[in-house]
Image (spheres, rainbow, N blue to C red):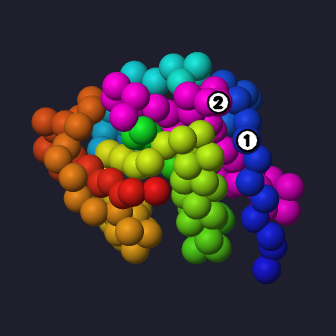
Amino acid sequence: MSKIEIRALAFDSPVAQSLIRAALADLGQRYGGSGDDTPVDAAEFVPPRGAFLVAYLDGQPVGCGGWRGHGDGDGTAELKRMYTDPAARGRGVARAVLVAVEESARYHGRKRMILECGDRQPEAIAMYTSAGYEPIPNFGFYADAPGCLSFGRVL
């Protein structure tokens, strides 16, 4: 089995943007439209306010995820742009990215992680709940959208 390597990259780097486009295409297939219209600024993912991580298998980028600060400095981080290439699914990539994102947020003083997810992502919901995430009141761009699910956990 290949070892998963996690690297911090700029959100607007070509590698990160390629994975983000794939993530949005996946979401677009599930929900229609662009996949996710949440306003996102690359500057939000620059430490210490956030970070963006890319997973590599055999030297190839296969997954990503990041966090950005959320709220009024209460120590909350928001998980964004989690994605694993379909060819790499089932190999622990998403779990490794999630752990690395949480470690990064914790390192930068965050105490809690929150996320928005949709009801058409059962594999993501299963991973988040198995990692200790619990339902929370909806927040953010899709708070009032049908099918929006929000989760959080203490880091």
- In x, y percent, where is residue 152? 33, 54
Residue in the foreground of this view, choosing between 12 and 137: 137
- In x, y percent, where is residue 30? 34, 50
Q: Is residue 16 left or right of residue 148?
A: right
Give the number of marks.
2
**Crowd class of label 2 (few under 14; some 14 to 19; many from 20; radius 10 Å):** some
Residue name at image x 46 percent, y 24 percent: 40
Residue name at image x 51 percent, y 49 percent: 82
Task: Tell me the number on the disc at residue 47.
Answer: 2
Q: Is residue 140 visible?
A: yes
Above or below, 98 against 51 in this view is below
Residue in the foreground of this view, choosing between 112 and 5: 112
**Crowd class of label 1 (few under 14; some 14 to 19; many from 20; radius 10 Å):** some
| Magenta span of residues | 45-74
Are circles 2 and 1 on residues that touch, CB within 8 Å?
Answer: yes
- In x, y percent, where is residue 73? 40, 28
Write down the quadrant of residue 141 in the picture: top left
Residue name at image x 40 percent, y 74 percent: 130
- In x, y percent, where is residue 98? 55, 58
Name the amino acid type tagged 2: Pro
Q: Is residue 14 left or right of residue 141?
A: right
Q: Is residue 143 left or right of residue 31?
A: left
Task: Tell me the number on the disc at residue 8.
Answer: 1
Disc 2 versus disc 1: nearer the observer: 2
Residue name at image x 80 percent, y 70 percent: 3
Q: Is residue 123 visible?
A: no
Residue in the foreground of this view, choosing between 129 and 148: 129
Residue in the foreground of this view, choosing between 149 and 43: 43
Q: Is residue 53 magenta?
A: yes
Name the amino acid type tagged 1: Ala
